Image (cartoon, rainbow, N blue to C red):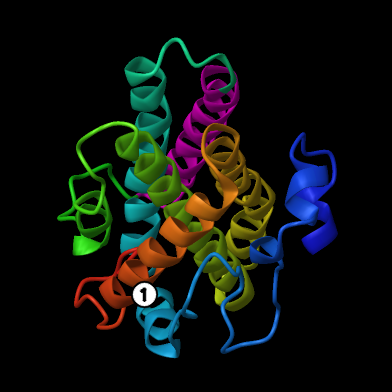
Amino acid sequence: MGREILDGSPYLSRLALHPLNTLISAMPAPSIKFLQSATSNAWIEQAIANLDIVLLDHSHCERKAAGVALNLMFRYPSRTRLVRQLTTIAQEELAHFDQVNQWLEHKGIPLAPLAAAPYGAGLRAEIRPQEPDRLLDSLLVAALIEARSHERLGLLGDHCPDRDLAKFYRSLMASEARHYGAYWVLATHYYDRQLVDDRLASLAQVEKQLLANLYPQPRIHS
């Protein structure tokens, strides 16, 4: 899967050289080195026991991920590389949104609002309001969220008792890896590499802390 994730990606040559992009299969080490902690067994048990809610939350996550890419394109319309790469991400996220919604329809689960876990808001609170810090933080927060999504969809693919749904989760892993890689590559394009790595480490520590205690409601990022 690790080779499949990167093969064909326009970011292959740069990502393959970066130590943070190494994928690790063994637990409890994080699946992706952007992350400073691995998902707990408690989350896996919670998610598998509440697959319908997790699937509904997954729909919300894909819609929000498309919104992140679109919002960055609107905020920075003159940054050609950003616009081009995030156009692709937004299209893929909306395609995934539609696929997840088809699964919801198949299972008879109606679309409905869900209260969000504090994860996303906690990471967004770390985005500094002034440029050039704002763009850097926005890209790295998006990268971390995509990296965690990649890890957790893989865990659902490994543990989901519904074989077809498990296969679907695994099918999304390659694009999630491309997405977190794209956000990181954009950050290193616009900013000094050492600055990116230092800020990523700081934000990854916050991300770890936000997931230290399992959110009582089952969510993709609980």
Where on the picture, by quarter, is residue 63? top left
Task: Report whether 58 appears left or right of 148.
Answer: left
In the structure shown, which secondary structural element does the residue marked by tag 1 occupy? helix
At 34% from the left and 33% from the top, the residue drawn is: 132
At 56% from the left and 48% from the top, the residue drawn is: 180
Nearest the eye: 148 or 219? 148
Q: What is the number of callouts on the image?
A: 1
Toward the left, the furthest residue is 115
Label 1 CA crowd tier, 10 Å (few <14, some 14–19, many 20+): some
Q: Amino acid at mark 1?
A: Lys
At 63% from the left and 75% from the top, the residue drawn is: 158
At 70% from the left and 65% from the top, the residue drawn is: 19
Figure check: 29 above or below 105: below
Task: Report whether 221 appears left or right of 186.
Answer: left
Nearest the eye: 102 or 120? 120
Q: Answer yes or no: is residue 1 visible.
A: no
Figure check: 132 above or below 31: above
Question: Picture coordinates of residue 12 (x, y %)?
Answer: 80, 44
Q: Which residues are magenta?
A: 82-108
Question: Picture coordinates of residue 32 (x, y %)?
Answer: 60, 68
Q: Is residue 58 magenta?
A: no
Where on the picture, by quarter, is residue 65? top left
Residue carrying label 1: 208
Question: Picture coordinates of residue 73 (x, y %)?
Answer: 41, 20
Figure check: 164 above or below 46: above
Q: Answer yes or no: is residue 181 visible.
A: yes
